[in-house]
Image (tube, rainbow, N blue to C red):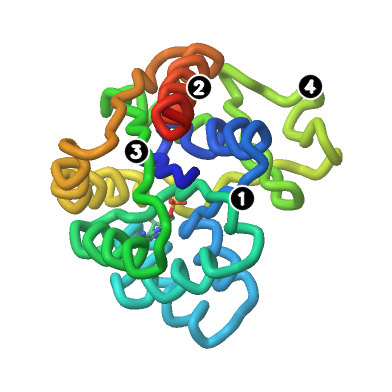
Amino acid sequence: MNLLLFGPPGCGKGTQSVRITRWLGIPGISTGEMLREEVASGSELGREITSILSAGGLVNDELVNRILTRRIARDDCRNGFLLDGYPRTLSQARFLEKHLDSAGLAQPLVLHLDVPLGDLKRRIAARRQCPKCGHIYNLLKDPPIKKNQCNEDGEFLIRRRDDHPNVVNSRLEAYQSWTHPVLEHYHNGNYHRIEGELPPNEVYAQVEAAIEGQMVRVLR
Ligand code: AMP
């Protein structure tokens, strides 16, 4: 099954993605993570996109489409995959639709984690990540056991560069202006609105119900 986890920065996509992919045994593909890895590697491409990422803008469609198609062609995606943060523009959504059709792959089940804007800024301000295993914490709602250290590997937690307040506003603006048409594109498809402002377990219960409903439909 192919899934698309859709929602603004700070809506909890990363947390839900980990739980869903563990459950279904499929890879979670975050274009944001792939782009950050590119920057961290110091490659030429990484240098080209550093300024876009640190300003909170969007990387161009052609580049992201290329990274994405290369990733979903890999063997671990043959039983499905979860997309997190892609597509973000109408052009990417149209590209993905065509690409999946031409590759004989299923169109995604769309899970939209909807969270009010005011909540997002508070959540992002409290978000920290383990630089080693990628685990995400919320200092207010889901803090690590030892102050500022990852529960899994003891690594010191960091704040993502693009989670700083001046960048967050640009990212939220980009989400509002670019991604609204993407949602419209999926509205008549296999679309589920999830109440993303609820506690993570309740969000997950809604996600699970949507996926199980899809499994039943596929088996019928
Ligand atoms: P994320 O971790 O999904 O919030 O992504 C972090 C940053 O990576 C975004 O603010 C964009 O600059 C870039 N990015 C990630 N995914 C895409 C995409 N599908 N299209 C364009 N830019 C992207």
Residue type at mark 2 is Glu
Tell me where residue 157 appears, x and y as whole percent: 70, 41
Residue 47 visible, this orientation: yes
Q: Nearer the viewer, mark 4 or mark 1?
A: 1
The front one of 185 and 201 is: 185
Per the image, the residue denoted by label 2 is 208
Mark closest to the chain's N terminus, 3 or 2? 3
Tell me where residue 26 appears, x and y as whole percent: 62, 46
Mark closest to the chain's N terminus, 3 or 1? 1
Q: Are marks 4 and 1 in contact (CB under 8 Å)?
A: no
The answer to whether 48 is drawn above or below residue 209 in the figure is below
Residue type at mark 3 is Val
The answer to whether 1 is drawn above or below residue 60 in the figure is above
In the rendered view, does 26 fall on the left or right side of 65?
right
Q: Which residue is at 50% across, 46% downward?
A: 82
Q: Secondary structure at mark 3?
A: strand
Tell me where residue 196 appears, x and y as whole percent: 38, 22
Mark closest to the chain's N terminus, 1 or 2? 1
Q: Secondary structure at mark 1?
A: loop
How much space separates mark 1 and mark 2, taking CA atoms?
Answer: 17 Å
Per the image, the residue denoted by label 4 is 145
Tell me where residue 100 appears, x and y as whole percent: 36, 62
Q: Nearer the viewer, mark 4 or mark 2?
A: 2
Q: Quadrant of ligand 1?
A: bottom left
Q: Are marks 3 and 4 in contact (CB under 8 Å)?
A: no
Residue type at mark 1 is Pro
Q: Nearer the viewer, mark 3 or mark 4?
A: 3
Mark closest to the chain's N terminus, 4 or 1? 1
Per the image, the residue denoted by label 3 is 110
Q: Which residue is at 28% across, 33% downward?
A: 191
In the rendered view, does 201 fall on the left or right side of 88?
right
